[in-house]
Image: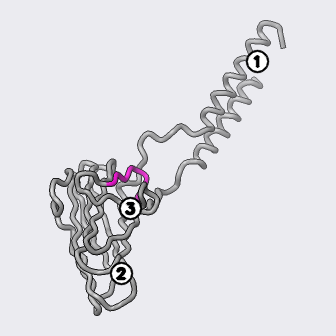
Amino acid sequence: MIVFGIVRSVLAAALISGAMAAPSHAATINESSVLGGDFSGLYLAPTVIRNGYDIVTGTVGTGDYDYLYFSGMRRGASTVSITLTAPPGRYTAQGRVYYSTTPFTLTNQGTRAGNIRVTPGQPGPQTITFNLGSSFAGSLYLSLNLSLGPVMRYSVYVPGNFGIPGVPVPAPVFMLGAAIAGLGAVSRRRRHGSV
């Protein structure tokens, strides 16, 4: 009876610890944290943003392209939004945002999500939003390009990239296994008369 009480207590503690260790929200990834400090400018080799990152931040300047590939988004309808912020000043900036559910094969390819347009009279920030339909299969390619203007900061919000597949087993589960194995060893020793 005591052994079952101990097992029950260890199991309850492991489950509580595991629940507390689980992430309550997804994370943000910044361009400066990737190798080389810049997202890919090559449409044939976009920067892969794996599950778990629902906000991506970076910068794009004149003649600069950023290609992103969200490799495991939630299937089905979702809304993606991109907010662009220009530095203070009076100037004009323009560019385009494209998206696709298949890999890009050209520089400006896919569905145009919107135009980047900043003028002295409309300095921003500017938000471009697009919807992925209910048939969306989970892979999203995104292209941001600024053809004119100063370096602009952007933030991409991809709520469908929240889930993390293949979550590692939390440490409390291993602790529970070790505790059960230890209790089994103690039980065997008692049965064989050696304590």
- Residue 189 at x, y percent in the picture: 77, 12
Vertical arrangement, residue 138 with respect to residue 131, above or below: above
Kind of residue indicated by mark 1:
Val
The kind of secondary structure element at disc 3 is loop
The residue positioned 32% from the left and 80% from the top of the image is 150
Q: Nearer the viewer, residue 104 or 38?
A: 38
Span colored in magenta: 47-54
Kind of residue indicated by mark 3:
Asp
The residue positioned 42% from the left and 61% from the top of the image is 37
The mark closer to the camera, 3 or 2, is 3
10 Å neighbourhood of mark 2: few (<14), some, or many (≥20)?
many
Q: Is residue 53 magenta?
A: yes
Judge left or right: residue 137 versus residue 3.
left
Q: Quadrant of residue 116?
A: bottom left
Report which residue position mark 1 lands on: 186
Say whether marks 2 and 1 touch (CB < 8 Å): no
- Residue 92 at x, y percent in the picture: 26, 86
Report which residue position mark 2 lands on: 86
10 Å neighbourhood of mark 3: few (<14), some, or many (≥20)?
some
- Label 3 and label 2: CA atoms lie apart by 18 Å
Q: Nearer the viewer, residue 12 or 102?
A: 102
